[in-house]
Structures are given as C-alpha cells and as structure tokens.
Amino acid sequence: MVVGGNKNAALPLIAACLLTDQECVLTNIPRISDVEVMARMLADLGASVEGIGTNTLRIRCAEVVRDEPQSSMVGRLRGSVLLLGPMLARRGRARLAPPGGDFPARRTIAIHLAALRAMGARELEGEGHVLEAPNGLNGASMYLEEASVTGTETALLAAAAARGVTEIRHAACEPHVVELCQFLRKMGADVTGEGTHTIRVEGAARLKGANHQLGGDYIEAGSWAVVAAVTGGAIDVEGARAADMEVVASVLQRMQVRCELEDARLRVEPSTPVGGARITTGLWPGVPSDLISLITVLATQATGRTLLHDWMYELRLFALDQLSGMGADLFLCDPHRIIVTGPRRLRGRTLDTRDLRSGMALAAAALAADGQSRLGPLETVERGYADLTGRLQALGAQVTKEP
C-alpha cells in the first residue's frame, strides 16, 4: 500500500498559491474530495486551476476577482479558513461564511482572527467573518494562545505577504506546518524556525511561483497500519517519512502489534494485541488526535483495558458509541476519555460516519466484525481517503460500494 500526499499539507499549500500571480505546480496531491473543494474555491476566486482530480495541480492566480468564496463550498471544508490571509493580501478584504468540516459548531477560528488582527486586519460587521486591510498587512510579534495547526498556518500565510518581520510563538510543529514553511520559502519569503515553537517570517514584496512535491501522509499510513492490526492481517505501508511514522509505530508496539519501521515503509505483521494502558493525544510529536478513533477500535480487539484520552476534541469519541451496538465493551468517562476492555467479538450493523476519522475507524471495525455492516455516507470518509472501496478490495476485503 502506497499512501498519497499529505492531506493536511495540501490544503494550506493550495491556499498559498493565491499569494502570487505566477504559476505554482503541486505534485503528489491526494485525490480526495477535500482537495477538490479547496481547488474549486481558488477557481471561484479567479484562479486558473488545472489538474483537479489528478495528482498534479497547476495553479495561477493572475487576478483575484472576488474576496468571498462560495458559502456552499466553505461550509464543506474547515480548511477554507486558510484563504483569509491570502485574500487580505491580494484584495485588502475578505469575507468568509462559517467554515464547515468536522464538528464545525465546536471548533472556533478565534486563533486565526487574533493572528490577522495582530498584523493589522480589522473585523467588520456582517454575516460570517468580514475583515479588511486596505493598506496591507504588517509584520507583528504574536503569541498563539493555542498551538493550533491551522491557526499557525493562517499566521504564516499572512506573514509571507506582510511588510516587515513576523514572529509566531507557541507555533505548531507538525510536519505539514514545516512543509508550508518550505513552500513559502520557495516562493520568496524568508522563513526560519519551522519545526520549533517559534517561527520567524520576513515577508516578500512580491512572492513568486514555485514547484513542490508533497510528502507522504503519515496519518493515512497510520490508518492503514491500524486497519491491518485490527483485522489481524499484514501490510506494508510505503510513502511517508519514517520520522513522521515513528509515533504510529510507537503506539502499535506498546500494544504488542508486531511492526517494523525502516526508510519510508511501515510493516505490520499478524499479531495478538494487548491493551495499551493509557494512550493520550498530544501536540507533535505526540499521538495525533486524527488517529485516536482507529486506536480505540484496535483496543476492542486487544487483551486487557485501555484508557484513551483525546483532550483536543470533545465530540470525536462520541462518534464511537456505535461500537457498543457491535458488542464492544466501552465506558465513556467524559467527552474526552473512554475506557475500552477487550478483546470482544464485534457484530456487523448499520454505522453512521459522523466525521472523517471516526468514519475510517468504523470501517475498520466493520472489517473485523462477524456478519455484514452497512457504512455511510461514504463521502464523509472519502474526504481524506482516496478510492476507499477499491483499496480495501485490493487488500482482500469483501466490500462493495452501493450506488
């Protein structure tokens, strides 16, 4: 199994293309619906976008004709918030409907707005989020109240086009933040400190076009590795950096899943997993929240008890209450913690994909269950996993996609 480019890097890199009037070329783009929505939003703003639905995007924003993306597309994608900084840089004004995606009502963009205000943007009255910076953005020194990934990316995108120097403290360190910094440097911004909690950006008067090949998606790699462990199977997952997949291998090894990590390959062998005691999500390089749902399903097949603690998102674990109806032994302590006791034989049933990551986790549970399961809507999972049914079939799963 070869994973595609990093979904969480693709969205901010596409947004960064709006900062220049020259052509940018992005390769190893994942063929997923979230990327397609982001690319179409740029086209709606006036960009020429070639290659939608392929692994290569050629984007040129010679002229930005609008400062408000279509609300219907914004409502499908939380990553649409990343357009605020580039729209302010190119148009001096930006209007954005409330971003959608997973748990939209519980995930604010306060960190993003604070960063833009620090660089001189003013918020105006109106529906959604309305900002203006008619005289351009200015570099600023800022401390992010939360080491938010997309909040850091919003600050970086704005800082790359701002006058002067911006220092971002308590910045996120995730690999996709590093990748955005590398791309902005190719475009002509002076960026230092990526991968640390303090990033310094000196904006460029005119950013230029650039080419970039996305790194492999370690969340997708981890997902397929856990699917194999849940079903007692074997898999070789290739395409993501070993340094990025260490956190995945560490959790699997703690649960006594036989795995080996070398170069850009993670190999999982048939195993008898055991409970992982306590597994807590954390800021990079801690356990990613995007994998906690899948690890919870793995815990249902592990001998003993596992406490899983996702302090980042309140609703992610609630989506897994459907596992109880499959026969799993779950105790939801509060919105952030769940205790799983295993192993338990799971039974097939109808499952609701309430968000992207728990949807993939429920797919893994369905594969491990006795009997047939019906999972939907599939579009929720395909936001982040390309050709899900085809790839599962290639791995030997008995799965069909209903019309």
Image (spheres, rainbow, N blue to C red):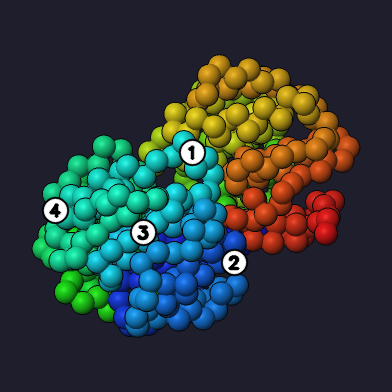
Q: Secondary structure at mark 2?
A: loop
Q: State the separation of the CA atoms marked 1 and 3.
A: 19 Å
Q: In the image, residue 364 lies at what x, y percent?
A: 71, 42
Q: Pointer 1: what residue?
A: 105
Q: State the separation of the CA atoms marked 4 and 2.
A: 36 Å
- Looking at the image, which residue is at 19% across and 65% down? 134
Please name the amino acid that badge 3 sits on.
Arg
Which corner quadrant holds the N terminus?
A: bottom right
Q: Which mark is residue 31?
A: 2
Please name the amino acid that badge 2 sits on.
Arg
Q: Which of the two labelled residues, at mark 2 and mark 1, occupies the earlier sequence position? A: 2
Q: Secondary structure at mark 3?
A: strand
Asked whether, in this view, residue 367 is left or right of residue 157, the answer is right
Q: State the separation of the CA atoms marked 2 and 1.
A: 27 Å
Q: Which mark is residue 140?
A: 4
- Tell which of 106 and 31 is nearer to you: 106
Tag in front: 1 or 3: 3
Q: State the separation of the CA atoms marked 3 and 4.
A: 22 Å
- Looking at the image, which residue is at 17% across and 46% down? 142
Please name the amino acid that badge 1 sits on.
Ala
- Residue 172 shows in the view: no
Q: State the separation of the CA atoms marked 4 and 1.
A: 30 Å
Is the residue under label 2 in contact with that under label 4 (CB below 8 Å)? no
- Tell which of 333 and 286 is nearer to you: 333
